[in-house]
Amino acid sequence: MPVVVPPPDPAGLPAPAWLLQILLVFTFILHVLAMNLLLGGSVVLALSTWRAKHSEFCAKLSQRLSRALPVAMSLTITLGIAPLLFVQVLYGQAFYTASVLMAWFWLSVILLVLLAYYGLYLVQFRPEWLGAKAGVVAWISALFILAVGLLFTHNATLSISPAKWAEMYAASASGLHLNWSEPTLIPRYLHFVVAAFAVTGLGLMLLATGYRKTDAEWSAEATRYGLRWFVGATVLQFAVGLWFLVKLPQGVMMNFLGMNMVDTVVLWAGVVLAVLALLVAQRSAIGATVLVALTITLMAVTRHRVRQMFLGEHLNVNTLPVNPQWAMFVIFAVLLVIGLAVVGWMVWQFFKASQPQQSTTA
Amino acid sequence: MEYPFWDIPLVGGGMLIGIIAILHVFVSHFAIGAGLFLVLTERKARREGDTALLDYLKRHSTFFILVVLVFGAVSGVGIWWAIGLVHPTATSALIHIFVWAWAIEWVFFVIELLAAFIYYYGWNRLDARTHETIGWIYFAGAWLSLFMINGILTFMLSTGKWPETRSIVDAFFNPTMLPSLVVRTAVTIALAGLYALITASAEADESLREKVVKYASKWVLVGMTIIPIGGIWYISRIPDQAREISMGGAPVVTLFAAASIIFSAFVFLATLLGPFLFPRRFHVTFAFVIVALGLITTGVTEWVREAVRKPYIIYNYMYSNAIRAEDTQKVWEQGVLGSAKWALLTEEDKRNPLAMGEKVFRFSCQSCHTVNGFNGIKFAVKGWEKDFLDMQIQKLDQLKGYMPPFLGNEEERKALVEWLYSLNNPPQQTAARP
């Protein structure tokens, strides 16, 4: 079978490839941070709701988490739109092709997200009405979110495997393919899931600090609980990450083992920062969060490099035609700054007014 | 034709997009109008010192969050998902032409969502002035994202000067951009009232119910009055051929266009004669009837808007089957299968006209036709002999249906004829099997 890659869009890139790649990777990092809290948080919510009857700690955890998770879901979706836009600009040729091959599964992401989202709201708004079933609903939401993650891994890996496309499409045009044959599929997926648990652990520790004054006992226990998630997941991640690395094709793997110095330094610096985060986590959740955010940044760069290496000359974004729209870009950049300021102001107003006021009707 | 074609049996891709799009339109326009409704009504309640009204608004905003933030946001992404799967080439074009417009829309969307959460969770937390300001920010963000998306959507039907100038300004500020913005804004106002009728009619307190029902019905009437005015302006700006299709050129489309007007009138009359004149007797069942009428109106109108764009997916630029108008000559020379790399034509196919014909169908016709389902080709050609088929395909763009010209070469045309003929006249050996 020949390797068939759709031609680039004749409209060209609306900005130089380097700028779009920065935007892609940067917005992807934001999306992944929110996604981690959602994915890990929904599993922790399911666990704690399940055990709420037997443990006061779990009951409070379930209630407090349930208020945060719909916001995490909303942020995950909203922050996902930007990288989805930029990936279509840069890698549309690969992204649309892979998506069509797995079309029904890809479309099911929408339904799974919708149901998981309503499930989370149900647990937040109607826990009494659900009673013992709250745990079941929370688990369904969590499993759907985990499934969505797996479908994204299918899409991401299929998108960077152009050699498989023609054979798949020749076998069937019904959009029912998945990428199970991909050796990196499972380790890659687990790499993301385990990271999500680690980040959620940190998130729990930060959540606990919000209750330090009002509910000191719970806050202390939640801090320990979050720390256990963070440490456990991060230690496990060393094994999963290694597994992922050795499953990469030889040529790609070797780049991260010294063949390409920059790639090697970026990857292993990320690992070192994660080790440092482990060491400081007990003393400072914020310190660990900063270090982990840096790790995620470096890992997102590494992920982008893996994509470039897999695609090679089949789709090299640096050779795409460029037809810049600078005026539009400047308008976007200005509005982005204004938008962030408005968002910052609103969030500040919200947290400034930390005491719920009596209904103000005058 | 540059991308693999997703084969959806019976239903077809257009219908799939349509279902998601109609639901999304019905919710997302409400999302915008409801922002205005909430903040204006909040001010009214505070000015009048009406605590009951304020409490109603809090309950209404829970409904708003559950409908807008969840279904609105997810179905919006869903449309994008679906068009990328069904029309990848056109989606890629829209993304590449409008990247920064999409990016700007995203900024407004982020503002909109955060403002919605803070407005909702801030009812008992923020002081009145800040809360109302957040409400205004929500409405501004929501309306501005409509402003952006409207420019991109209208471009698909009226590309204006863009095909010659290729300038983003011409693309965005295209001939139908403003009239469509007026219509859509009016729709947001009408829908805000419509949804408020549901929540209001479920209120227990009788005097409150009467007050809000009457008030909300005015929103519907105002919106429904502006829609036809904007609509006439809109129709006057669409391409001539598109107008022809809606006004007699294609009977089905004309029927739907008429249905759109009739159902709009129903919504108006039902609101006038129901909640506006007799708010006291208004019942939640009746509210759902009006909402159902509104949903039907939205459905048929969006369907007409899609239908009149034929044979294009992006007017004067790209046909529904993903062939760019400017590439017509090239495709003509190379043939359909020579141009569509994803046909993956094999030597075996070349010896088998039926296999070849099916591939020709997939890459030139299947974007609008299914085989034996919606707009099924099997029924369209029933009883047609091979000679007649061959003749009709050669003047496809003159048949009913507003189709693009057939660009295959002679060998491909013959293969397509064979395959089309075989649909209703199975070859002997297959017919013999049970």
Image (cartoon, coloured by chain):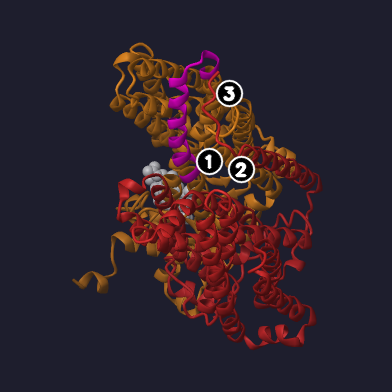
Chain colours: A red, B orange
**Disc 2 crowd, CA 10 A, few/some/many (<14, 14-19, 20+):** many
Main secondary-structure element of the magenta-colored stretch? helix
Asked where in the image residue B285 lies, by quadrant, the reply is: top left
Highlighted magenta segment, given as a residue range: B45-70
Q: Is residue B103 left or right of residue B373?
A: right
- What's under tag 1, amino acid-wise? Arg
Q: Is residue B54 magenta?
A: yes
Q: CA distance from mark 3 to mark 2?
A: 28 Å
First in residue order: circle 2 vs circle 1: 2
Using the image as rendered, state which of residue A261 and residue B9 is in the foreground.
A261
Q: Residue at x 33, y 27 (%)?
A: B202
Residues B298 and A200: in front is A200
Find residue B240 and report its horizontal and vertical position in percent. 57, 32
Q: Which residue is mark 2?
A: B109
From the viewer's perspective, is residue B146 above or below residue A317?
A: above
Q: Nearer the viewer, mark 2 or mark 1?
A: 2
Contact between marks 2 and 1 (CB within 8 A): the answer is: no
3 or 2: mark nearer the eye: 2
- How crowded is the residue under tag 3: few (<14 C-alpha within 10 Å), some, or many (20+)? some
